Image (spheres, grey):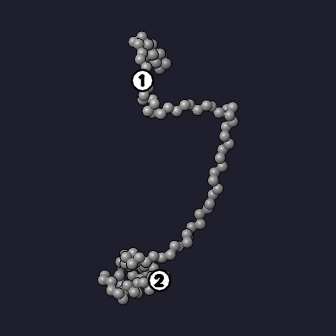
Amino acid sequence: MGWDTKDVALLKRLWSAGQSAGQIAVRLGCSRNAVCGMLTRLGLKRGHKPPTARPKIRPPPKLRPALSAASARPAAKKVSRIAAERQQPKEFSKQQLYAILAEAVRNTG
């Protein structure tokens, strides 16, 4: 559809009167998408609509009481990955390796 000045003026007037894009399209004899595109190109917008839904505003969840200091376990010390990579691997003798392996076999049986 070609938009001439008469059509644009009618579009602006109907839009400011509060008609929908579909109603304007029927009146102008074009598609609703054509009307929406022209409204976008002209920079015409509707004001903000009030929200239709009324969401319930809930209070924040209650925090659980902290454990007492006597029953709390101390946290393990965190080791960064870089620090762990810097540590040299432990060197074991052949006899120590066999002892570790024998212990592992006993524990898995």
Please indicate, yes or no, whether residue 36 appears anywhere in the rendered image.
no
Any mark on residue 48, and which? none
x and y, in percent, of residue 86 in the image: 42, 28
* Amino acid found under the numbered disc labelled 2: Ser
x and y, in percent, of residue 10 in the image: 40, 87
Mark 1 Cα within 10 Å, few/some/many (few <14, many 20+)?
A: few
x and y, in percent, of residue 70 in the image: 69, 31
- The residue drawn where x is 41% and y is 17% is 91
Mark 2 Cα within 10 Å, few/some/many (few <14, many 20+)?
A: few
- The residue drawn where x is 47% and y is 83% is 16
Residue 90 shown left or right of residue 52 in the figure: left
Residue 67 shown left or right of residue 4 in the figure: right
Q: Nearer the viewer, residue 77 or 26?
A: 77
* Amino acid found under the numbered disc labelled 1: Gln
Q: Quadrant of the N terminus?
A: bottom left
Disc 1 on helix, strand or loop?
Answer: loop
Above or below for 34 versus 97: below
Q: Nearer the viewer, residue 45 or 21?
A: 45
Above or below for 43 versus 59: below
Hey, which residue is sitting farthest bottom in the picture?
A: 6
Instruction: Please report contact status of discs 2 and 1: CB closer than 8 Å, yes or no.
Output: no
Q: Which residue is mark 1?
A: 88
Give how far apart the Cα atoms at labels 2 and 1 are: 77 Å
- The residue drawn where x is 39% and y is 82% is 25
Above or below for 22 versus 64: below
- The residue drawn where x is 55% and y is 31% is 77
x and y, in percent, of residue 81 in the image: 45, 33
The picture quadrant where one finds residue 6 is bottom left
Disc 2 on helix, strand or loop?
Answer: helix
Q: Which residue is mark 2?
A: 16
